[in-house]
Amino acid sequence: MNSPKKKEGQMKKKDMPDTQCSRRSFLKTTSIAAAAGSASLVTGCIPGKNSGSSEEFKLKWEEYFKEHYRLMTQEEKDATISRLVRLAKLQRGLDLQMSSRPAREQVLYGYAFNISRCEGYMDCVKACVKENNLDRKSKTQYIRIFEMEPGQLDPSTGDAKYFHEVPVDNKFYMGVQCFQCENAPCVKACPTKATWREPDGIVVVDYDWCIGCRYCMAACPYWGRRFNWGKPEIPDEEVTTKQHYLGNRIRPMGKVEKCTFCVQRTREGKLPACAEACPTGSRVFGNLLDPDSEIRYVLKHKKVFRMKEELGTDPKFWYFID
Amino acid sequence: MSTTSQKGFLSFLYDCFRWNMQGSLSFQIFRLLLFAAMAFGIYAYSYQARSGLEVTGMSNIVSWGFYISNFTFLVGVAAAAVMLILPAYMFHDPDFHRVVIIGEGVAVGALVMCLSFITVDLGGPLQAWHLIPGIGQFNFPTSILAWDVLVLNGYLLLNALVPMYILYCHYKGQKADERKYRPFVFLSIFWAFSIHMVTAFLYQGLPARPFWNNPLMGPRFLASAFAAGPSLIILVLAVVHNFTNYKLDKKVFHKLRLIIVISAIINLIMLFSEIFKEFYFPTHHSIAATYLFFGLEGHDALVPWIWTSISGNIIATLILAFNPGDNNPKVLLPACFLLFIAIWMEKGIGLIVPGLIPSPMGEVVDYLPTWVELGVTLGIFALGITVVTWLIHPALILEERYEKMRASKMD
Amino acid sequence: MKEIIHGSILRSLVLGAVLLTSHLALASDKSVLDRIKAANEPFDTMKIDSTHPLSMKTVRSNDSYQGGTFKVLTRKDSIERFRCSGCHKDKKVQVRDGVSFTHGDIVINHGSEGTSLSCSDCHNEKERDFLVGKKGQKIDFDHSYQLCGKCHFRQKSDWVGGAHGKRVKYWAGERVVYNCATCHNPHSPRFKKRMPATFSRPLDE
């Protein structure tokens, strides 16, 4: 298949001028010039009480001046990952495995949610929080399950704050999360290209490139994005150590994050954590470009709809009814 | 005079600084107070920088708050300088020519505040260099925020450089060469409209937010700015007229009042049009307006706010239109102040916060700024006022000297 | 004044051109549905080698889905006292063993009121190690979906296709799905009411 989106992984030349050379030399001179003066700025203002060791300082320093992820060569990606892994070891004693696996060819991820099957147990939400290292302090969640009155399909009429025995008779449940829009308003909004759609359709954020302006959050019609208002807190023993640079690695403070269909899992062939945790089989996930996949079966044989389709965002997340 | 006229640019800057150090005791105390406010702002910001934006009242639903509200309003104030520039440079209106420098000073101050508000709102201010074209990745022309960065900085440059050139010429005792600065004046006039429209497009371009996704946004933005900005300028001119030796003609106030009245009336008509659209046949898209004007699901933090603003708007517009005091400053100035505050309430929090409430998934929360946001905002306002005084104070001294010099030459 | 007008026209033209081209650039991208329609070549999911081997016991299904044959999690391994014929044979069960060996803990809540199922509707009375279809066919416990599908034929076809039930752990690799009884208690197939696993914090807290 000669999809026009095949080359999205590498940036288009027009998109991102090849200024690496000058950029690098610029950064070099800047860093030398600025080293003396702003050393305290970088380490002092990126909060971290125990930034004592010189190795940690050096790693942070190199991290600060690194490239946009999509402009990095594989060596540079490996270098930043080894720095991040080392920093996690130095700061928290964590042994991480971090991946930079790119999108696979001929894969476009899609999701279908069976609103007549979901019983509102929220096992998906719990699994998502654990898998994606979401901040426990603010109780950040990517998924929101709405308890819906019959007769309406708009989640704004539902209640997402329920905590009682489920399912309640005569109610149904509807989960929302990032819909990985093909024509994503958030990607269009970002002033620094820190968020983009990968060739396999997942909209990701380069957490280190994001400046935290939150324009993408205003632009998202599905409330799919979350912000790290404080420093994320996850107990050491609960950290998921299998991570992806664009996925569930622990986010810095002041950056936007979002559901990535568990990119760290799905690119290894696994189901997203929510789909694996679902006890009712309401969550169908698969490759939209594979005519034999379950998701394609749903699209072909079920009556499906997408949320706010009139906005033209072209989400890759469908709802269906048995 | 002849001694200074020989000196170069450095001595110009030095003299400006020196003149700034002079001034009455009360003026200096006023400045010290501003510095104290800025210090408090820096303290509040350092607290925010350490703990993260969680110390603000913002949340994942109301992801923009007091900072962006003030930013949005101040873009209008900055753009309003064009209401002095246009008649002064284009129509060679002598009254406006004498005060245009003040308008430009106010614009620079407003822009400094705008950029500061954006900076303090960033989650990663240290990564702001990612925006710089060449070193970073500037998502132009796709991202309207990238446009905004461009137009705001451009307008700041234009509004700083043109007056600086004119003042520098006057400092040297020469007449500024109109052929040199006129193209930039033209540019700055269009630029003023563009900073406004682009900032409106920032919101208008988001189909996710029906409250903002409204073609009247840009035009209404302009109308309200051309009411609020000149109101502020009238107040500043009144201060200049009363507390300095730089005396102004009453006609300036009269002309500015006319500009304000026309803009304020257009603003009110558009407001009525918006309200009609939202409430004649309320749809799903009217829900944010319902929250703003009447409250939703027991959340009504903004209801008194917006009604106060609209009442103030109407009252001030009526006073300015019927002009009961016949340009008596005792009536004119409070009316301008009221209009300015009313539009600040409406085009700030009244515009930004309800755009985000309820969330696109229909969940309603209230937003109240915390002391940190108020502190930082106070600091930025103090910074803006400081910038304005530091610019206008030497500028007026210079202009006064230049006028005297020309008068003596004429004799 | 003329200059202003000229300038503004020029400006809006430039702006319009920029916006238009950026829009055209977007429009040339195909929509998801176009891409789906164009994708008719099966994807070789076996090449994602991180998906195998699967540690759970599986059996090849007698049905096949759109992508060929597939595997089902076994059932017999999760039935505690399989083989049933261990007890259910000619030899009589001692009364003292009856307490632990009878299936008194089983509550049948299957079928709608009035037409509730009884043991013998599914269990083969003659050959206890098998289930039985309506027409007396022997059905292996590992292929219980064949029995369930006799009544729940719509669910069955959805299950085969992928709209009902779920795959085990992987979206890629060889297709392995849960059997009916992995999720549904065959004696009482409706999901039970329970408290949610977690909750969402009220956002206005």
Image (spheres, grey):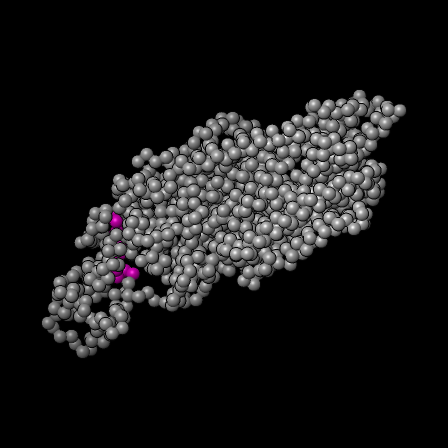
Tell me where residue A76 appears, x and y as whole percent: 44, 33
B318 or C158: which is nearer to us?
B318
Residue B409 drawn above or below residue A112: above
Residue B306 drawn above or below residue A107: below
A245 or A198: which is nearer to us?
A198
Tell me where residue A217 appears, x and y as whole percent: 51, 47
The answer to whether residue B338 is left or right of residue B51 is right
The answer to whether residue B150 is left or right of residue A220 is right
Q: Is-magenta flag for residue C181?
A: yes
Q: Which residues are magenta?
A: C174-183
Q: Which part of the image, by quadrant, shows the N terminus of chain B?
A: top right
Camera sees residue B93: yes
Q: Is-magenta flag for residue C67?
A: no
B367 or B287: which is nearer to us?
B287
Q: Which part of the image, by quadrant, shows the C terminus of chain B?
A: top right
The answer to whether residue C187 is left or right of residue A168 is left
A220 or A177: which is nearer to us?
A220
Most distant residue in the right direction: B411
Most distant residue in the top direction: B6
Tell me where residue B213 appears, x and y as whole percent: 53, 47
User: Residue at 61% of width from left, 45% of height from top?
Assistant: B220
Tell me where residue A39 sits by quadrant. top right
Tell me where residue B361 appears, x and y as whole percent: 47, 55
The answer to whether residue B203 is left or right of residue B397 is left
Most distant residue in the left direction: C90
Tell me where residue C88 sits by quadrant. bottom left
User: Residue at 20% of width from left, 75% of height from top?
Assistant: C97
